[in-house]
Amino acid sequence: MNTVKRIILILCITMPVFLLAEMKIGYIDSNRIMSEFAEVPAIQAELEKEQRALEAQYNKMLGTLDSLKTNFDKQRLLYSEQKRDEKLKEISETERKLQTFQMEKFGPQGEIYRTESELLQPILVKIDNAIKIVGAERGYDYILDANSGAIVYALNSHDMTDKVLEELEKAVPETDIKAP
């Protein structure tokens, strides 16, 4: 059972029938929106171009490292101990630079993900605004994302955050904090 169905089932079980009859719930398919929205392919093409450029840089660095290792293996017996240590140090430094490049460009906080976020941000704002307009115009109380089960639109009147915070403040006894 997908997440949206579970949420709807929970709502049905936990809410009185008369409240549910008045509530209007809809859902969206965010994957379909992203695949069919006309502005997304241009952004994807730009991202792929950026990724290919970074991969080319990475492959060039990898080629340099492979070349250093191959040359070292061929010449190892001819090097003095000092020269051997220098070459090993050079190989280690090149490996470190390669790993750093990989993390800076492709890691979880890397350049490619920051670029994607920057390029997609205006699109996501447009999608969010469209969802809010549709929800308000058509009288939906909630709109869920069928892929994640997350609420992407809700009437402010259903937001219980302030009430929960108030209840938490009542439940937590105040303690005297003494300064050292």
Image (tube, rainbow, N blue to C red):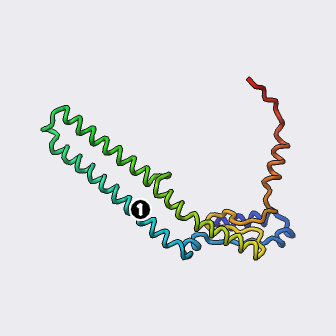
Quadrant of the rendered image containing residue 25: bottom right
Residue at the limit of the structure toward the top, as seen here? 180
Quadrant of the rendered image containing residue 171: top right
- Front position in the image: 123 or 152: 123
- Helix, strand or loop at label 1? It is helix
Side of 55 where 133 appears, left or right: right
Q: Residue at x 35, y 46 (%)?
A: 97
Q: Residue at x 69, y 63 (%)?
A: 151
- Front position in the image: 4 or 50: 50
Side of 88 where 34 appears, left or right: right
- Front position in the image: 14 or 95: 95
Q: Position of residue 18 (x, y in %)?
A: 87, 70
145 in relation to 165, above or below: below
Side of 158 where 88 appears, left or right: left
Give the tally of numbered discs. 1
Q: Position of residue 150 (x, y in %)?
A: 67, 62
147 in relation to 163, above or below: below
Q: Position of residue 22 (x, y in %)?
A: 84, 72
Rate crowding at label 1 as few (under 14), some (14 to 19) or many (20 or more) other CA atoms within 10 Å.
Answer: some
Q: Type of residue at label 1?
A: Gln
Q: Residue at x 71, y 74 (%)?
A: 134
In the rendered image, which quarter contains the C terminus?
Answer: top right
Name the residue beneath numbered marker 1: 51
In the rendered image, which quarter contains the N terminus?
Answer: bottom right
90 in relation to 42, above or below: above
Side of 61 where 72 appears, left or right: left
Q: Position of residue 31 (x, y in %)?
A: 57, 70
Q: Residue at x 43, y 66 (%)?
A: 48
